[in-house]
Image: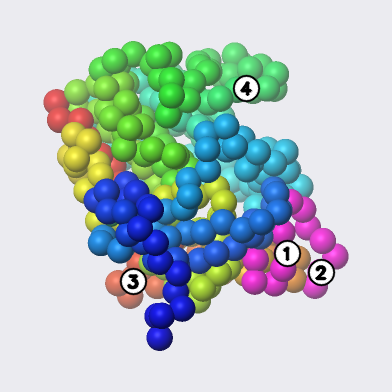
Amino acid sequence: MNTLTPTGTNGDCLICHEKAWRLVVRSEDLEYRCRPGTWDLVACAACGHVYIHPLPAAADVPALYPATYYTVNCNSPIYLDGAVVEKKMVQDARRLRDAVRGVNVRSIVDIGGGNLTRLMKLQEVFGAGTEAICLDFQFDAAALAAAKTAGLRLVQGNVETDLSALRDNGHDLIIMRQLIEHLRDPRAALREVFRKLAPGGLLIIDTPNRGGLDYALFKSRYWGGYHIPRHFHLFSQPHLVRLLEETGYQIFRRGYTPSIAFWIISFRNWLGLNSNERSRSFWEFLYLKNLPVSGSFFVLDLLWSKLGFQTSNQFVFAQKRG
Ligand SMILES: [Zn+2]
């Protein structure tokens, strides 16, 4: 059966360093068509870790993120803003505060934060005296103005190459949401972040998980979590935990959360709809800000997880021992 599955021996597994791999999925960029051609996600022949192969060169990475990318494009069907989102961010911030009780949080860093609203809500919830830093490649004028008003610090940096703007042993909560899967070398980045964490501090990671019902339905090609060619590493939770432990962390808390966006992107990919903008298709009710649709997928994932199954989003809080 598997004789037609391409395999190779020129890989490099982030988790176990095995060279052999087998093809998992080959696809063009279904969401943004950033450039023609296909990319391969492969699974390590020894441990099963899934990664893009070959790894795009660092210089080629910016071209994989078009100007229409959902984080900066309010016309994208995956873009989120508005009162409901803000309310959810306050709720998330309170949950995080409750989950990390016992950790003295004086400084929060959101790496690749992009959306400053989340950081503002965190600062409100943790208290006005808490230092709140957003670290990103660059900031536009609107972000600079918003940060000044809200008392946030914006610092330019790159988690893979330059964290010099952060203090060694200087930050109590470092947040990497939907980021680690985009990195070329997550192991090196985790080591650097470890250096920047205060003793007792926590790194908060969330990242796609190949384990939800949407993954089971769409894994042959259309699953939103693949996000080809921008997700370089797709971690199972045991692999993520292993990587964190090998880079010095202790696991503080971990689990799975509903993943509405991957449901919507998976269906959109399957139906031939892109993530740049909404078209005139009948199926265009499938967008993230459509509350009945998002709410339905949320409830579905919640019920699914209550039955004991995984969802397509996972989190791990990892601590630098005090
Ligand atoms: Zn491996």
Q: Report the magenta residues as a range.
A: 269-282
Residue 172 visible here: no
Q: What element carries label 1?
A: loop
Ligand 1 quadrant in view = bottom left
Which amino acid is tagged 1? Answer: Leu
Question: Which residue is the site of mark 3?
Answer: 309
Q: In which quarter of the image is residue 273?
A: bottom right
Q: Callout 1: 10 Å neighbours few (<14), some, many (20+)?
A: many
Left or right of 178, for residue 321: left
Task: Report whether 197 appears left or right of 287.
Answer: left
- What's the amino acid at mark 3? Phe
Residue that badge 2 annotates: 281
Frontmost residue, 9 versus 296: 9
Residue hosting label 4: 139
Instruction: Specify which label sits upstream in the sequence, 2 or 3.
Output: 2
Q: Mark 1 points at which residue?
A: 273
Q: In the image, what residue type sits under mark 2?
A: Ser
Q: Which of marks 3 and 1 is in front?
A: 1
Instruction: Tell me which corner region of the image, top left, top right, bottom left or bottom right, holds residue 187.
Output: top left
- What number of labels is visible? 4
Residue at 30 percent across and 63 percent down: it is 45
Q: Residue at x 35, y 20 (%)?
A: 107
Sequence-wise, the earlier of marks 3 and 4 is 4
Q: Position of residue 42 (x, y in %)?
A: 43, 60
Tell whether label 1 touches label 4 (CB within 8 Å).
no
Mark 3 or mark 1: which comes first in sequence? 1
**Mark-to-mark CA distance, 3 and 1:** 28 Å
Q: Distance between the residues labelled 4 and 1?
A: 30 Å
Question: What's under tag 4, amino acid-wise?
Answer: Phe
